[in-house]
Image (spheres, rainbow, N blue to C red):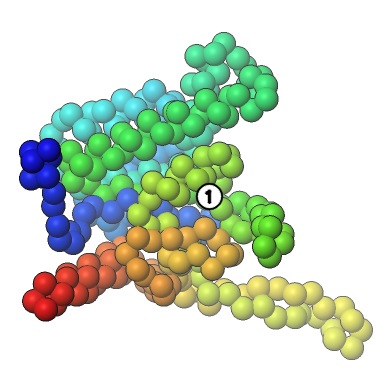
């Protein structure tokens, strides 16, 4: 027992981030992730545009696992892994399950059995990402598109929320794993256009082109963080990652200051 207790650690230490960035198409998710230190992109779609970054494309779950295994076992200079996008990996997971089970479609298993099998695939995938983070000290950044889903809440009723564009069984696996889930969106306002006198107006949305990363869940989208951040983080068109990393670093600095004061008391 003494040997076990001797390994107890204390103190607040900042570790590489496990970050999920969600948002609509074209909002700048990939650009934000590209600002992470020395990134390597593993892509399931052609979404880098003008971004010049080291990239490996994957078109199967087996190849995805092989990429992660090599990153874990081989020496390299990458300090961040960006997976773009996780909802592009879902068809690869389903294809692997169908191949193993001799089915043409994930729905052919019946009674959601194929989707239940996917839980194990995703769990192993995130464990492998954690192994990579621990072995190589890498930030893990996962990008996801979003879909609008109806939530039936027994307390407040039914409402609509933006969630990662994944099967409903996979979303909680992803959200449990992440340290930060940020919903990236521009500031929007609504106005009526048309002829008020003839009751021919239509409500339209206007973007301010000022973007924010929302890291606290207010019901409109899934967002969270484990660092006590409550305010949305302004994200500039360039070098947006520094705003996120500085916000997290400030929380760690504050926590360390509190701990030192308590120890001195």
Give the residue at the far right of this rendering: 198
Residue 219: where, in percent of width, then height? 58, 65
Placement of 201 over or under 180, stated as above or below: below
Any part of residue 124 in sight: yes
Q: Which of the 4 image quarters holds residue 83?
A: top left
Residue 9: where, in percent of width, then height? 13, 52
Q: Which of the 4 image quarters holds residue 199?
A: bottom right
Residue in the image at 58% along x and 24% along y: 114
Give the residue at the far top of this rendering: 102
Question: Mark 1 packing: few (<14 Cα in 10 Å), some, or many (20+)?
Answer: many
Residue 26: where, in percent of width, then height? 51, 58
Give the residue at the far front of this rendering: 1
Query: Looking at this view, is 251 or 76 the one in front?
Result: 251
Q: In the rendered view of the protein, which quadrant contains the C terminus? A: bottom left
Q: Which of the 4 image quarters holds residue 239?
A: bottom left
Any part of residue 31 in sight: no
Secondary structure beneath dot 1 equals strand
For label 1, the residue is 164
Residue in the image at 56% along x and 53% along y: 163
Placement of 180 over or under 235, stated as above or below: above
Residue in the image at 18% along x and 29% along y: 73
Residue in the image at 68% along x and 58% along y: 154
Query: Looking at this view, is 248 or 22 the one in front?
Result: 248
Q: In the rendered view of the protein, which quadrant contains the N terminus? A: top left
Q: How many marks?
A: 1
223 sits left or right of 203 in the view: left
Give the residue at the far bottom of this rendering: 197
């Amino acid at each position: 027992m003494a040997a076990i207790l001797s390994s107890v650690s204390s103190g607040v230490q900042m570790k590489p981030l496990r970050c999920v960035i969600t948002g609509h198409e074209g909002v700048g998710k990939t650009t934000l992730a590209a600002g992470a230190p020395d990134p390597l992109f593993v892509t399931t779609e052609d979404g880098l545009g003008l971004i010049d970054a080291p990239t490996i494309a994957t078109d199967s779950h087996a190849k995805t696992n092989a990429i992660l295994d090599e990153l874990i076992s081989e020496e390299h200079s990458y300090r961040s892994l960006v997976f773009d996008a996780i909802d592009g990996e879902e068809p690869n997971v389903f294809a692997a399950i169908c191949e193993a089970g001799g089915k043409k479609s994930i729905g052919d298993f019946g009674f959601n059995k194929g989707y239940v099998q996917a839980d194990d695939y995703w769990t192993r995938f995130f464990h492998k990402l954690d192994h990579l983070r621990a072995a190589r000290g890498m930030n893990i950044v996962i990008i996801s598109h979003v879909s609008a889903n109806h939530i039936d809440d027994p307390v407040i009723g039914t409402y609509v929320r933006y969630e990662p564009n994944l099967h409903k069984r996979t979303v909680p696996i992803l959200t449990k794993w992440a340290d930060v889930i940020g919903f990236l969106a521009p500031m929007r306002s609504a106005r009526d256009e048309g002829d008020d006198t003839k009751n021919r107006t239509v409500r339209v949305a206007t973007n301010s082109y000022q973007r924010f990363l929302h890291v606290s869940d207010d019901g409109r989208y899934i967002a969270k963080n484990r660092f006590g951040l409550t305010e949305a983080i302004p994200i500039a068109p360039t070098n947006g990652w520094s705003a996120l990393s500085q916000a997290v670093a400030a929380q760690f600095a504050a926590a360390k200051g509190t701990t030192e004061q308590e120890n001195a008391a």
